[in-house]
Amino acid sequence: MASRSGKPLILISSCLLGLATRYDGRSKPSVVIMSELGSRVSWLPVCPEAESGLGTPRPPMRVIRQVDGSVGLVRPADGFDPAPMLLAWIERTLPVLLSRLPDAAILKARSPSCGLETVAVLDARRSGVEFPGDGLFAAALRQAAPELPIFDEDALATPEQCRQFLRQLTEG
Ligand code: SF4
């Protein structure tokens, strides 16, 4: 489903577009994605952490696998659990985002919210690291929209990868 402009509509982590939403108050723009796709698609930017009220800048947080196997979050600096705020926002906002009928999603790698199979997950004792893991938003997006093509930014690191991405979207 194309956007009103007729271009493919791409859900994207806001920081990849240069918006200063990261925990350290900076952005992490992808020059390749912006230059190769910027004028050829319509963007639907989203920052789960900033938009859920965690603030920018904010202390870094980690994904943690609980003793019961469920996945949550922890903020090592003070032990705060940001998961309830983030999950409540996801529950409210994901249906709204998906109602826009995006054609694909591009997510920031290694983020505890947006990371797709690239997140270092702490074990329940917080003593070790497991790989791979999804961020909480990425996991919810996968579950809510199993048919949606979701790309990690690292899969679109070259102009040719971006052109291939676009061909797949426009040629079906
Ligand atoms: S990775 Fe996701 S949560 Fe983190 S700043 Fe970028 S858009 Fe926001």
Image: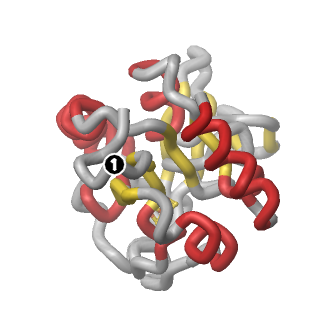
The reply to whether residue 1 is visible in this rendering is yes
Placement of the C terminus among the 4 image quadrants = top right
Looking at the image, residue 114 lies above or below residue 95? below
Residue 153 or residue 171, whichever sits in front = 171
Residue 54 position by quadrant: bottom left
Looking at the image, residue 120 lies above or below residue 102? below
Q: Which residue is mark 1?
A: 6
Left or right of 30 on screen, residue 137: left
Left or right of 86 on screen, residue 172: right
Q: Position of residue 40 (x, y in %)?
A: 49, 62
Q: Position of residue 147 (x, y in %)?
A: 51, 19
Residue 60 or residue 56, whichever sits in front = 56
Looking at the image, residue 84 lies above or below residue 7? above
Q: Position of residue 133 (x, y in %)?
A: 69, 35
The reply to whether residue 81 is visible in this rendering is no
Placement of the N terminus among the 4 image quadrants = top left
Residue 47 position by quadrant: bottom left
Left or right of 64 on screen, residue 8: left
Q: Residue at x 62, y 30 (%)?
A: 65
Looking at the image, residue 103 lies above or below residue 145? below
Residue 76 position by quadrant: bottom right
Element type at marker 1?
loop
Q: Residue at x 61, y 17 (%)?
A: 69
Q: Residue at x 43, y 46 (%)?
A: 8
Left or right of 125 on screen, residue 28: left
Q: Amino acid at mark 1?
A: Gly
